[in-house]
Image (tube, rainbow, N blue to C red):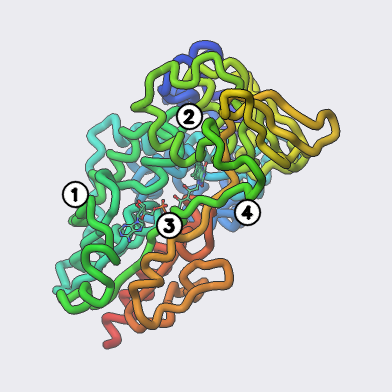
Amino acid sequence: MANMRMDKIPMPEQDPKARIGNFDEAALGYTAEAAVDEAKRCLNCREPRCVEGCPMSVPIPAFIEKVAEGDFKAAYEKLFAVSNLPAVCGRVCPQEALCEGRCIRGIKGEPVAIGRLERFTADWHIQNGGASPDDGCAEPNGHRVAVIGSGPAGLTCAGELVRLGYEVTVYETMDRAGGLMMFGIPAFRLPRSVVEMEIVRLESLGVEIITESTVGKMDSVDELFEQGFEAVFIGSGAGKEQKLDIPGEDLPGVLSARNLLMRAEELERDALGGKRVVVAGAGDMAVDAARTALRLGAAEVSVLCGVPVNELPARREEIRRARAEGVRFLPETAPKEILAGANGHVATVLVSGPDRDSLAADTVVVAVGAGPDPLLLRTTPGLDSTASGGIAADPVTGATSRVGVFAGGDAVTGAATVIAAMTAGKNAAASIHKYIQGK
Ligand SMILES: Cc1cc2nc3c(=O)[nH]c(=O)nc-3n(C[C@H](O)[C@H](O)[C@H](O)COP(=O)(O)OP(=O)(O)OC[C@H]3O[C@@H](n4cnc5c(N)ncnc54)[C@H](O)[C@@H]3O)c2cc1C
Ligand code: SF4
């Protein structure tokens, strides 16, 4: 029988005061009992609006029905048939703007907690061995495809292609695979072990990942073709950080958010001990940088939002958690200039905003977004770019101006979301399959 409770079953969290003392996951996930109860809130709609809201068309009511029945294995199989990274999506997808934003239960109360149920199902699978479901990878077809970048775009493309029987090699600059899932989104939102498990599962399907290998510096795209790859997918992300473009941005004490997030777990626990930290930016990266600064001992963290708080392009749930941890959001306030103190180090940020015109600061963190790195455009003849510096690619097929080269994710669109990157990777895999089989 349906559970007609109006709100979502709450998901336990670490206490805010305790969690700013560690990098462990803030949200603790549903128990099996809570998941079954929440799943029973789903009405199993005949025309499920939630699925329309999901870029990957995950069969949401079908997997939730299995959770409600307590058949978590079957629930996982339904998810994995469509998504290569369910434990990631369940944690970081902006569900409020996608599936949950469309859920019929959200009209009079809270939507079904689709993200929490996805996370529960994927975690249950990991805790129970984490092997790939026997979903029948096709027999090897003898064709080879190279994938550049091991973020969600590249990994999804690779996962789809090995399932179709291709031999896929992923090249990755960093020493670990995962892209921004590993080096951007902080561990207190997306534990590294979860990303690793998803990657191990893809490797067990046959995806080969070569780390510390930058295409364009080592082999070029042309050389990959010479080595026998018949198609190349570029999922190289948007690794070139944008700047504030205000005076004082190069002063000691001004940090880049990407750099801070990438190094956070190796830094001393009091690396920002007692400091007043000002974060400039409004998206997920800004909120993550602010929460990271608290975990590194900052005494006070303020985010200069530039927009009203209800318009922040960051996840609602994470803004709520950030506030509970002590992050202060200054709406409609933008930095104008960063000034040094007598020691030459950052001391003050001049701002324009409704409540103040300056703010004392020991550290300023710049979190205003990122654009694609031009390396591959520079080293691949015939590859066209977009006006904003991305790789020009068909939004549906991922085809670029170079025959046999496909692209998707942040490398094409600029900084976006995991699910958008996964969708692009999946669509490109279908196009690559069609292209190679049609040759
Ligand atoms: C702090 C932060 C928080 C975020 N939070 C969220 C969130 O909550 N929800 C959400 O949906 N999205 C979030 N995002 C955005 C999301 O992480 C990205 O949109 C997504 O990871 C893009 O995927 P991608 O595969 O296109 O690129 P990436 O994840 O950037 O992966 C690209 C990979 O390609 C590699 N590479 C680049 N060039 C080369 C080369 N020449 N040769 C070999 N390898 C190369 C890079 O090293 C990298 O590993 C966040 C991003 C940041 C920075
Ligand atoms: S719209 Fe909501 S209630 Fe309907 S099937 Fe989807 S999750 Fe269930």
Q: Earlier in the sequence, mark 1 or mark 2?
A: 2
Q: Earlier in the sequence, mark 3 or mark 2?
A: 2
**Tag 4: Cα neighbours inside 10 Å, few (<14), some, or many (≥20)?**
some
* Residue at 44%, 16% in the rendered image: 270
Mark in front: 1 vs 4? 1
* Along the viewing direction, whichever of 330 and 85 lies nearer the viewer: 330
For the residue labelled by badge 1, is the local secondary structure a helix, a strand or a loop?
helix
Find residue 108 and report its horizontal and vertical position in percent: 75, 37
Q: Which residue is mark 4?
A: 49
Q: Tell me the kind of residue under disc 1.
A: Ser
Q: Is label 4's Cβ within 8 Å of ligand 2?
A: yes
Q: Tell me the kind of residue under disc 4.
A: Arg
**Tag 1: Cα neighbours inside 10 Å, few (<14), some, or many (≥20)?**
few
For the residue labelled by badge 3, is the local secondary structure a helix, a strand or a loop?
loop
310 is higher (above) or lower (below) than 157: above
Q: Which residue is mark 3?
A: 237
Find residue 123 and report its horizontal and vertical position in percent: 36, 33
Q: Which residue is mark 2?
A: 35
Find residue 254 and report its horizontal and vertical position in percent: 55, 35
Q: Tell me the kind of residue under disc 2.
A: Ala
Q: Residue furthest front?
A: 342
Labels 3 and 4 touching (C-beta < 8 A):
no
Q: Earlier in the sequence, mark 3 or mark 1?
A: 1
Alpha carbon distance from label 3 to label 4: 30 Å
Q: Earlier in the sequence, mark 3 or mark 4?
A: 4
290 is higher (above) or lower (below) than 197: above
* Along the viewing direction, whichever of 115 and 325 lies nearer the viewer: 325
Q: Which residue is mark 1?
A: 204
Image quadrant containing the C terminus: bottom left
Q: Earlier in the sequence, mark 4 or mark 2?
A: 2
